[in-house]
């Protein structure tokens, strides 16, 4: 039975939401403080046109906006030190860094990476859950439905089919990529888009094509 009904209605309207192994139920009951903070951060997020147009480099302003909101609530980037011990030998086996971590919740933000990063995140969640380091994993990404906005802004070339968007994540999530770890995923939709810039060439053309009022 799904526990997605525990996700607030406004978030279900502004994000595509999927879960694996009743992750929303785990978050709301086992990690209620972290769950409330996730709701607060995601409810306050807006996808600004100015940040889409400025995106580039190692980390986009969009990713920085979300990370900063979590860090302000004392979440932190975290790498777990793990090792395998065989008789008297110890082999270091560190995990990948988690973007945001607090208590027993690991959260990854995938705005515009190559889509194999989803495999890395889900495998990391699986390992950390099996090691009893986390209770649940969360992924925040973007919806494929944002593509028309990128095209209108002339940015679609930066957001190709092989990057991190919801149509690449859902098959991996539904296919059990997270193993036994409950995983909750949010994909940013056009409902969160705010056009805070000057008219685009397309918008200008549409206005010019409108018939004059008599």
Image: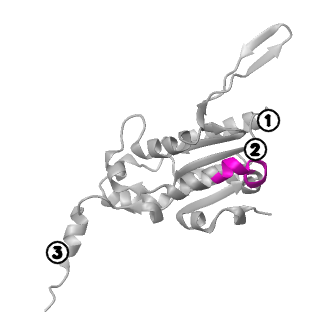
Based on the picture, tell me whether residue 32 belongs to the magenta stretch: yes
Does residue 30 appear left or right of residue 8 in this picture? right
Which numbered disc, 2 or 3, marks the residue that appears first in the sequence? 2
Query: SS for tag 1?
Result: helix
- Residue 169 vertical placement versus 129 (above, below): below
Tell me which secondary structure the magenta stretch mostly adopts: helix
Q: What residue is pinned by disc 3?
A: 208
Asked if the residues shown at circle 2 and circle 1 are in contact, with their CB atoms under 8 angstroms apart, the answer is yes
Tag count? 3
Q: Nearer the viewer, residue 190 or 192?
A: 192
Residue at left offset 47%, top offset 65%: 191
Residue at left offset 31%, top offset 59%: 196
Q: What residue is pinned by disc 2?
A: 181
Q: Which residues are magenta?
A: 27-36
Q: What residue is pinned by disc 1?
A: 130
Query: SS for tag 2?
Result: loop
Rounded to the nearest angstrom, the CA distance separating label 2 from label 3 is 54 Å
Q: Quadrant of the N terminus?
A: bottom right
Query: SS for tag 3?
Result: helix
Rendering quarter of residue 204: bottom left
Rendering quarter of residue 166: bottom right
Residue 53 image offset from top left, x and y in percent: 32, 49
Q: Is residue 171 visible?
A: no
């Amino acid at each position: 039975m799904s526990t997605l009904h525990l996700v607030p209605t406004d978030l279900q309207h502004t994000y595509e939401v999927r879960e694996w192994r009743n992750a929303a139920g785990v978050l709301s009951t086992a990690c209620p403080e972290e769950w409330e903070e996730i709701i607060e951060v995601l409810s306050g997020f807006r996808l600004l046109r100015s940040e889409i147009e400025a995106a580039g480099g190692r980390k986009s302003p969009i990713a920085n906006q979300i990370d900063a909101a979590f860090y302000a609530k004392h979440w932190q980037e975290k790498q777990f030190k793990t090792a395998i011990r065989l008789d008297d030998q110890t082999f270091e086996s560190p995990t990948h860094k988690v973007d945001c971590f607090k208590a027993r919740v690991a959260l990854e933000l995938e705005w515009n990476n190559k889509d194999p990063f989803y495999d890395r995140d889900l495998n990391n969640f699986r390992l950390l859950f099996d090691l009893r380091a986390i209770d649940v994993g969360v992924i925040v990404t973007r919806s494929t439905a944002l593509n028309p906005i990128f095209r209108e802004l002339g940015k679609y070339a930066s957001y190709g089919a092989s990057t991190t968007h919801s149509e690449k994540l859902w098959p991996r999530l539904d296919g059990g990529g997270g193993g036994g770890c409950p995983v909750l995923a949010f994909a940013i939709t056009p409902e969160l888009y705010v056009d805070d810039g000057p008219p685009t060439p397309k918008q200008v053309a549409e206005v010019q094509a409108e018939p004059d009022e008599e």
